[in-house]
Amino acid sequence: MTPMKSSAPLILLFAASAAVAATPAFDARVAAAKAAVATRPGFIYDTAMVPAMHHALVPCVPKGTDPARGGDFVLVADVDAAGRVSNLDMRPASPLARCFAPRFGALTLRAPPLKAGQARYPIVIEMLTKP
C-alpha cells in the first residue's frame, strides 16, 4: 500500500501541470484571434458580431443589477463557414462568462472572412465590465 500513497502526489502534480499547460494554448488562440481582427475584413467581422454578443449577454444581466459586477472574462472560439460557433473557451470562468458562453455558442453568426483553405475563423471576446 505504500506505493499507492507515494503515487498520489505525482498524480496531483500531473493534473496541476496539465492545467498550467492549457494557458499557453489559450493565449495562442487569443493572439490568433487578435491578429485576425487586426485586418480590415476581421475588423468588419468583429464589428458585425456586436449585436450577437449583446443578444447573448442581456439575459445574463438581471434587471436592476450592475453589469460591472458580472466579472471580466476573455472568450475564444472558432466560427466555421456556415457561421457555427465551436471550440469555446473562457478565462476566468466567472458567473457572467458561464452564462454568456453557451448562449453565444448557440447562435449562428454570419459567415466569417475565411482565407483559402481555412476551415475555421478565430474570434475573441474580451468582456470588460468595469464601470
Image (cartoon, rainbow, N blue to C red):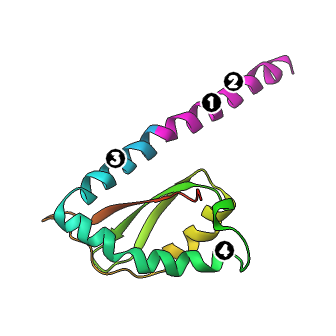
In this image, 115 relative to 42: left or right?
A: left
Compared to residue 123, the image places residue 34 above or below, namely above
> Judging from the image, what secondary structure is the residue with disc 4 in?
loop
In this image, 1 relative to 14: left or right?
A: right
Verify CB contact (< 8 Å) between mark 4 and mark 3: no
- Residue found 34% across the figure and 47% down from its top: 31
N-term-proximal mark, 4 vs 3: 3
Residue range in magenta is: 1-23
Q: Give the camera-side residue of 83 and 17.
A: 83
Residue carrying label 3: 31
Determine crowd level at label 2: few under 14, some 14-19, many 20+ residues with C-alpha closer than 10 A: few
Verify CB contact (< 8 Å) between mark 2 and mark 1: yes
In this image, 3 relative to 54: left or right?
A: right
Q: CA distance from mark 4 to mark 3?
A: 28 Å
Q: CA distance from mark 2 to mark 4?
A: 42 Å
- Mark 4 against mark 1, which lies toward the viewer? 4
Residue carrying label 1: 14
Q: CA distance from mark 4 to mark 1?
A: 37 Å
Q: CA distance from mark 1 to mark 3?
A: 27 Å
- Mark 4 against mark 3, which lies toward the viewer? 4
Q: Give the camera-side residue of 99 and 128.
A: 128
